Image (spheres, rainbow, N blue to C red):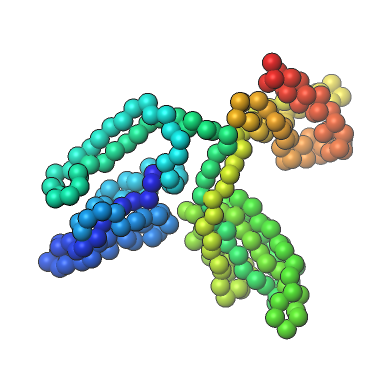
Amino acid sequence: MSTPVAVGGGVARFSESTYPNPSPATAEILRSHRFPFERGTGDYELSTPTGVALTVNLVGKYGTLGQLKAEAIGYGAGSKEFNDIANILRLIVGRDENPSHGHDEVVILETNLDDVSGEVIGRAVERLMASGARDVTITPVFMKKNRPGQIVSVIALKSEAEKLAGVLIEETGTLGVREMPVARHISNRTATRIDLRINGKIYSAGVKLSKDQAGKTVRAKLEYEDLRKISNQTGVSLRNLQKLARLQLDSIDKQAKQ
């Protein structure tokens, strides 16, 4: 995780010209990756294009430093001397002291539609999910001139936003897509698999396990796609497969609580 990048203020001179900080290359890298930045202290160039490029590609998420138990601390010093601040980069390795759940940053893409058919919207949803969207929802609304319409909402990683907005525009013909950055709170989770014996044969299904702060399982959710495949292969209904799997899931819960 990284805190927002400090880019500095004032101006820098290179290529026989003077530019305000951040430099054009630094600003473009941050923009294209939708990575947050701030001015920082001092009228100097605090982040170079190379340093920013490394940061946006190595860091999985960004935010403020929470409750952390530091295990190791490292420093790297630059060669340029500043008058009022130390020219160093600090890296802290540690453990979250309050890991009740995880956090990440995503974006929500939205557009309003009132002049496309259900077939067009259905195809758009298919392409959005196939292109990397985390989720897509359709909300019925009344729009201008009392016309019924739909709001298409897409949850996506910030790195996928540009591509998915293009898919949404291409498939629906909308004239604009709103983009809103949001923070998510995510339960800690692991994955496992269980075996289901049906008519003498063994079928495997995936299970997502949500855990509380103490590491105990609080919810187990079967993978729908696995159950659908098993249902197609055996002719057993989805409801009966869920009942059969419940015995296995109860056993997992008991083992987790011991």
Q: Position of residue 95 (x, y in %)?
A: 45, 29
Q: Relative to residue 103, is residue 164 depicted above or below? A: below
Quadrant in the picture for residue 59: top left
- Tell me the residue at 43%/45% (across/down): 64
Residue 129 is situated, as x and y percent measured from the top left of the image, at 63, 54
Q: Count the numbered circles shown.
A: 0
Q: Residue at x 61, y 38 (%)?
A: 187
Q: The N terminus appears in which quarter of the rendering? A: top left
Report if residue 48 is visible in the image.
Answer: no
> Residue drawn 42% across and 29% down?
69
Instruction: Using the image, determine if residue 197 lies above or below residue 68.
Output: above
Outermost bottom residue: 145
Is 203 left, or right, of 9 in this rendering?
Answer: right
Seen from the viewer's position, the closer of residues 152 and 92 is: 92
Left or right for 54, reference 129: left
Considering every residue shown, the one lying at the far top of the view is 258
Q: Residue lying farthest front?
A: 84
Residue 119 lies left or right of residue 3; in this view the side is: right
In-image side of 138 versus 86 (left or right) = right
Q: Position of residue 180 (x, y in %)?
A: 54, 61
Quadrant where the C terminus is found in the figure: top right
Q: What residue is shown at x 22% (from left), y 55% (from top)?
A: 42
In this view, 161 is above or below 90:
below
| In the foreground, 37 or 147 | 37
Q: Nearer the viewer, residue 199 or 46?
A: 46
The answer to whether any part of residue 140 appears in the image is yes
